Image (cartoon, rainbow, N blue to C red):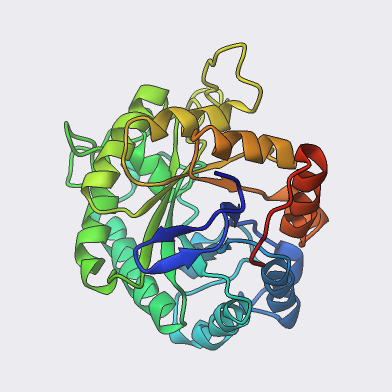
Amino acid sequence: MTIFDSYKVKNIEIKNRIILPPLVRFSKVGRDGLVTEDLVEWYRDVAMGGAGMIIVEATCVAEDGKLRHNQIGIWNDTFIPGLKSIADECKKYNTPVIIQIHHAGFKEEIATITEEKLDEILEMFIKAFHRAKKAGFDGIEIHGAHTYLISQLNSRLWNTRKDKYGIKKNNRVAFSKMLIEKTRDIFDENFILCYRMGGNEPTLEDGIEIAKELELLGVDLLHVSSGVPLLDIKQEVKIEMPIAFPLDWVIYMGVEIKKHVKIPVIGVRKIKEEKDASWLIENDLLDFVAVGRGMIARPDWVRWAHKEYERRTGTKIRVDY
């Protein structure tokens, strides 16, 4: 098994194990949140470069839920044509493309947000999912990491709510559960449901339990990243890992979570070298590797990695770009 082997999720054939993670490209988006030709060209370059699958960057469900002014949006139908141009361009190169749906959350404590406001945001997510499918994507990634809205709701440190959005035993992901159940009809065998989760919400044990819940809810693909920081000092909660583990602690969380679920897992964070990506896949530690900064530096990272693999191993392999 190599990073160049294909993998099928539902009916979607992913030609290799190398994923472009959702990297926000603020410099390529205007204040209106509409897709620009520069943004389409960026995704076109990555698709041409051989990526197995592309996850389009955080796309906001509400104008008041953006990370910053120049973030792409999906809060009404005017965004569909631009988003469709990205999906269409990627598919020209036999590259499946899914889109990350996002809300930045709140600076104040999530417990203070009214239930009615969360009901309203939930409905915005539902409508955004339908727009994404209409735009021609192969699936959706729910953004449930990085201290954004859903991450705040998934964290027992942040979420002290007592209503239907609160954390309860065997229901750590109440908002996500409602969202998935209310959109289940759109996730047929040709439409993937991916979930970017915090592996530390706040502990790895919490992350494992969340992953198990998401699997039971029917998530097709897990993308393990980092969760919320400690509330009082806003400091990231790093996970201890064996000294012998050679890569980043966030990758380690993905490796550990994979041991507890049957659905495929994407690992991410500081994967730059072909040898590191190959080690993770060849040892069945992960199912996919996400290469972010490496693809910003060279959108044809997969082609480069192919040459590196053959040089390093002395083995010639046939690769479908």
Would residue 308 appear left or right of 95 to someone viewing this image?
Answer: right
* Image quarter hosting the C terminus: bottom right
- Is residue 127 among the parts visible in the rendering? yes
Q: Nearer the viewer, residue 85 or 156?
A: 85
Q: Nearer the viewer, residue 22 or 2?
A: 2
Above or below, comparing residue 77 to residue 183 in the picture: below
Rendering coords of residue 86 (x, y %): 60, 78
Q: Residue at x 53, y 15 (%)?
A: 240
Quadrant housing residue 109: top left
Would residue 257 appear left or right of 280 to someone viewing this image?
Answer: left
Quadrant housing residue 220: bottom left
* Image quarter hosting the N terminus: top right
Would residue 208 appear left or right of 300 to someone viewing this image?
Answer: left
- Name of the residue lying farthest toward the top: 243
**Count of labels shown?**
0
Q: Nearer the viewer, residue 263 or 72?
A: 263
Rendering coords of residue 33 (x, y %): 61, 74
Rendering coords of residue 286 (x, y %): 50, 38
Above or below, comparing residue 231 to residue 74 in the picture: above
Above or below, comparing residue 98 to residue 260 in the picture: below
Would residue 279 appear left or right of 284 to someone viewing this image?
Answer: right
Above or below, comparing residue 108 to residue 175 in the picture: above
Rendering coords of residue 23 (x, y %): 64, 56
Q: Residue at x 61, y 11 (%)?
A: 243
- Is residue 272 among the parts visible in the rendering? no
